[in-house]
Image: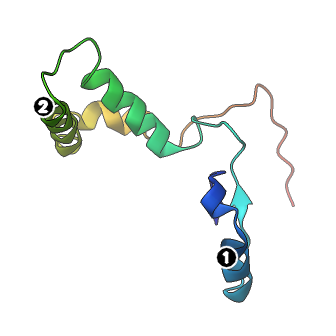
Amino acid sequence: MILDNARYQKCQVVADFAKIVDIEVAYLPAYSPHSNLIERLWRFVRKECPCSKYYADFHSFNGAIQQCLDQCNGEHKAKLTSLLSFKFQSFKKVNILAV
């Protein structure tokens, strides 16, 4: 299982549970937004909703974010399909060894 480096995911409870259910836990590097899809989604939402816009109150601001998230499978689907793909490589040159 791959987890980010949130403190609550690196606690002893998580380590003990992983051992009980016999899974290996791997952690993403400390700062790796390109590897974490939710970071890409939040960057998109920040760009689409609150960027350079004024909201009179928190309710309006919250509503704009909710509306953006609700449109992820509709109006924003084409943009998000390429943004949230796993087709990326962060290394310049990779040697692949056949086993």
- Distance CA(mark 1)–CA(mark 2): 39 Å
- Side (left or right) of 52 relative to 63: right
Crowding at dot 2, Cα within 10 Å, few <14 / some 14-19 / many 20+, comes out as few
Please name whichever residue, 56 or 67, is drawn nearer the observer in this view of the structure.
56
Whether residue 84 is visible to the viewer of this picture, yes or no, is yes
Crowding at dot 1, Cα within 10 Å, few <14 / some 14-19 / many 20+, comes out as few
On the image, numbered disc 2 is attached to which residue? 60
Position of the N terminus, as image quadrant, is: bottom right
Residue 36 in percent (x, y) is at: 55, 44
**Mark found first going from the N terminus, 1 or 2:** 1
**Eyeballing the image, is 38 above or below 24?**
above
Element assignment for label 1: helix
- Side (left or right) of 82 relative to 39: left
Residue 58 in percent (x, y) is at: 19, 33
Q: Which mark is residue 13?
A: 1
Which residue is at the far front? 57
Looking at the image, which residue is at 69% across and 31% down?
90
- Side (left or right) of 8 relative to 66: right
Element assignment for label 2: helix
Which residue is at the far top? 52
Q: Amino acid at mark 2?
A: Ser
Looking at the image, which residue is at 17% across and 40% down?
71
- Side (left or right) of 95 relative to 31: right
Residue 10 in percent (x, y) is at: 70, 62
Q: Residue 81's image quarter? A: top left
